[in-house]
Every structure is written in structure tokens, then in C-alpha cells.
Amino acid sequence: MARSSRMARVGIGVAALCLGIACFGCQGSATMDPSIEAMVETAVQNAGINTEDVAAVVGGRIITQEQVDRAIQFEREHNHLTNDKAWRDYLESADLTEWDVRAAILKRLIDDQLIELVADDLDIEVTDAEVQAYVAPLENRYPSRQSFLDALEASGYSEEEYLGSVRRSMLWDAVREAVVPVPEPTDEQVREYAIVVAPTLVGRRSSHILFSSSDYAKAQEALEKLKNGADFEELVAEYSIETGSPDGDQGWDCLDTFVGPYQSALDKLEPGEFSDIVRTRFGYHIILCTDEYTAPLDANGQVDIDAIPDTLMAVIFQAMERSIETQMATEFMAFLEEDTPIAVFDEHGVQVPNNEIGLGVENVRASDAEPTVTDVQVQEEPGKDPALIVDEDVHRPTANGVL
């Protein structure tokens, strides 16, 4: 991704990203601010479309009603709500109207355009090759390209839509990296955060020896050696087929999601105990519980921060950094929404107030609330079902959580 040397930062040189005047006409097209009206007329003329086909104009860029309609249809298909009755029932159960959904999706599309504008201003680009490089490790987890495409289809994606969503996600990440400074929380802030988070991180740490699904005899052989006092790490080096963790360490179960049989076996172990042979879709495992964590309390019943394992404390620190970074990013998005000339129209072509769809409000973008490959690392063994990769490990465009 090419980056300009003009790296704007939140609160530092942010005026360089002002993309237009901050005045909006919010009382219908008859009283539209003249500068906004001129922007809309110019954009419509340049695009050669009818004004009633416009859902929004963002800094001169048009979002069409058709784009919004397609995005709504995608959400309905993805959530298996194509049947009109199912759709009405969903809206009623969620206490939503058609406009609520349309407005949320429209806001997301507007935010995407704002990110594109900032990326252009900062000379940030995501190439097709970069998108393919990002997707390749996920695709390689499937036995064939066709099975990967089948998984996309099952999740409501065409390949083009999926690659487009990945590109938008990567572009937003690059813009965030450019405009949001690295958080520098103080020791006191970290301690206060840890006091809140530490009690929720209850779990076990484990290592395992992994055998292929055709090597049950080897698993039995290793288990007998273990029962006779052999060193676990030496057996990992001798037998395990996993390449991702040479010493077999799988980390804490409170931080990662393990397949059911693995987690069930681990739940029964105390530190220092090992399991019998456990079968999962990845093969056979022998699991060793290496540690257990519950929030340590001091004499006054308060969380003892100094007793939290360093590995968990590092995770707590990273979580706090991400939380601060996300807040700064959402503040920046709210600034862009306020500072960029934007005109918004309902499905009938009537202009609506920008704040009616949440523009300028510091609420988290849907993509910030969803895990990505960089936020939640997919483990090779044990780990998440590859069928979940599309939904859980890549930003998926949603209606800001409406659906």
C-alpha cells in the first residue's frame, strides 16, 4: 500500500483532511444549502443519472438508490430473510422499520466513501495483489478452490463481493494506521483497565501433541511413553505434526476458541495433568494443561494486578490499546461525517437530515466490532472451523449491526 508522507493524525494536522465546508441543508431539497445543492447538481450531471436515483452525494461522489437496494438484498440473503414474511417478522421482532435498515446501510456506504476520499487525499491504495495476498491464507485452508467458493456462496457472497469487502476492510485499516496515532496508555490506566478485565479471563492454558488422523497407533505409543514419565516437550518434538507452535503451546482458552472435543478434554484437566487421546477434525491430540487462571485477589479482596501472568497482562494491554485506538478512529469518522459536504435522500428522493441516519455520531463502525484475522488469530490445530472463516475472520459489510 503506497502511503504519502503527509500522514494526518487525529488532533495533529487534521485540518489537512477537511474535505469541504461544514454546512448542511437538512430541511428538504427546497431549502438545501446552496453549496450542497451545487455539489449535488454537478455530481448528477457528471454521472448522467436522474436525481431520483441518488441516495447520497458524499464530497461529490454519488451513492445510488440501486446500490442501497443491493446492499439491503445482500443482508437479507445473508441472514436467510429473502421471504417477505420472514423479513417482516424479523423487523417486528427487532423493533425496526424498513427505513431503520436502509438508513443504517446508507450510513455504512457513506462511511465507505469517506474512507475512499481520505485514502485518495493520503495517496493510500490497496491493490488487487494485496487483496489476493490477504485472502490466499484463508483460501488455502480449504481442500480446493471450489470448496472455498462454495463456502463464500453459503455465506451469501460472490467472489467479487467478497474481494470487495476485503479491499474495503484493508483500506479502512490503512487509513486508521495513517490517521490514528499509536495509543500510549499510562501505567495507571493499564492497571485500572486490568482490574476490570482480569476477572473475565478465567481459563486454562494448554499444550498438545498432534497426530494425523491416520496415526492413532503413534498416538497410543506416545501416550504410553508419557504415562511412563517421558518429557512432554520431547514428545512434542518427536511426534507432533503441527508447525505453528514447535513446543505445542496453544495458549489460553479464554483468549482463543478451540474445537469442542479439545475444549471438553481440557476442561477436565488440572495443571500438570494430560488427557487420553482426543480426536478432532484436525487429527488426534494428547493435551497437557500447563496453567490455570482465575483473577488473583489480594488481602482486601481486590484484584492483585501484580499476580496476573505476564502473558495475560500483555493481552490486557493490547486490548486496552485497541479500545483506545477504536475510540479515536470513531471520533475521526464522526469528524469526517460532520466536515464533509454530504446530502442524504430517502428512497423517494426526498432529502433527509444527515443526523437522521447517525452521521456525526461517535458510534463504532460495524467493521470495528467484528474480529479479523489480525484481531483473532486462526489456529491451525485446534482452532475454528474453516467454514466459519468467511464470517468470523474477515470484515463483513453489515448494516452497522442492524442485521
Image (cartoon, rainbow, N blue to C red):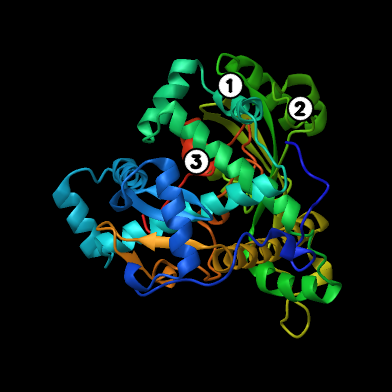
In the image as oriented, which residue stretches furthest toward the bottom? 300
Sequence order check: which comes first, mark 2 or mark 1? 1
Residue for point 38% across, 41% down = 48
Q: Amino acid at mark 3?
A: Gly
Identify the element where label 3 is drawn. Answer: helix
- Local crowd size for mark 2, using a 10 Å CA cut-off: few (<14), some (14–19), many (≥20): many
Q: Amino acid at mark 1?
A: Asn
Callout in the foreground (1, 3): 1
Q: Is residue 369 left or right of residue 208?
A: left
Residue indicated by mark 2: 236
* Label 1 packing within 10 angstroms: few (<14), some (14-19), many (20+): few
Please, what secondary structure does the residue beneath circle 1 have? loop
Residue 142 point in image, percent of width and height: 52, 22
Image quadrant holding the C terminus, namely bottom left
* 315 left or right of 287 in image: right
Identify the residue under disc 1: 140
Does label 1 or label 3 sit earlier along the sequence?
1
Determine the CA span between mark 1 and mark 3.
23 Å
**Residue highlighted by disc 3:** 260
Q: In the drawing, does residue 61 fall left or right of residue 187?
A: left
Label 1 near label 2: C-beta < 8 Å?
Answer: no
Tell which circle, 2 or 3, labels the residue nearer the N-terminal end.
2
Which of 11 and 288 lies nearest the eye of the viewer? 11
Q: Residue at the spot x=78%, y=74% of the render? A: 189
